[in-house]
Image: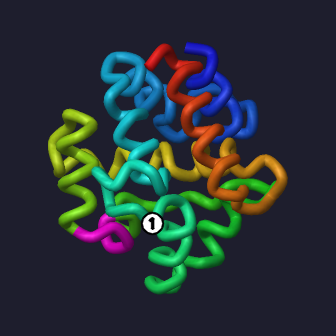
Amino acid sequence: MGILDGLLKQATGGQGGASGLGGLVSVVSKNPQVLTALAGLLSTRDASVGGSGGLGGLVGAFQKKGLGDMISGWISTGPNPPVSAAQVTDVLGPETLAQFAGKAGVPVSEAGSLLAGLLPAVIDHLTPDGKVPETSALESSLTSLLSGFGR
């Protein structure tokens, strides 16, 4: 579970399981499909969750909803601002949220909360230089993330 430990530490600034992220790590460790579904959302090669917009499309969706500064904070090298389940639900919309839930094997009612806990840490992890990487580098990072978790 090293990748998840690293994401947890990164998401909480080294504070352990603050903000309920310990519970998120537990959910993901018991249900690795969550990580696969999240990679699908962030990938341009996997259109099963949210189409093929990938991380760039997600950035655009956050900007369109007036939350560009929030996602920019996750991409930057500074602290990650929190996001609520309601904000994630508003940005993604019911169709993408349902696609994520279906692929992750979780109820749609829990998908927004799950993504609110995971997106800041995972996006921060995928953008260590403070910018969205080129598509091939991003896809490679997503593959490493999944393989690092044994998927």
Residue 54 at x, y = what percent?
A: 48, 60
Closest to the observer: 22 or 98? 98
- Number of numbered discs present? 1
Q: Quadrant of the C terminus?
A: top left
On the rendered structure, is 66 left or right of 141? Answer: left
Q: Quadrant of the N terminus?
A: top right
Closest to the observer: 61 or 10? 61
Q: Please give the name of the residue rendered at 67% of the width and 46% of the height, measured from the top-left corner.
A: 126
Closest to the observer: 87 or 52? 52
Scheme by which the image is coloured: rainbow
Q: Is residue 130 magenta?
A: no
Residue 63 at x, y = what percent?
A: 54, 81
On the rendered structure, is 101 left or right of 5? Answer: left
On the rendered structure, is 80 left or right of 108? Answer: right
On the rendered structure, is 63 left or right of 29? Answer: right
Q: Amino acid at mark 1?
A: Gly
**Image quarter for residue 23?**
top left
Q: Secondary structure at mark 1?
A: loop
**Image quarter for residue 30?**
top left
Tell me which segment is drawn in magenta.
89-93
Q: Please give the name of the residue rendered at 74% of the width and 31% of the height, measured from the top-left corner.
A: 14
State the residue position of label 1: 53
Q: Please determine whether, in this image, residue 124 is positioned above or below residue 87.
A: above
The chief SS type of the magenta part is helix
Q: Residues within 10 Å of mark 1 (few under 14, many from 20)?
A: some
Q: Please determine whether, in this image, residue 17 is positioned above or below residue 135.
A: above
Q: Please give the name of the residue rendered at 55% of the width and 33% of the height, measured from the top-left corner.
A: 143
Residue 56 at x, y = what percent?
A: 56, 67
Q: Please determine whether, in this image, residue 141 is positioned above or below residue 46.
A: above
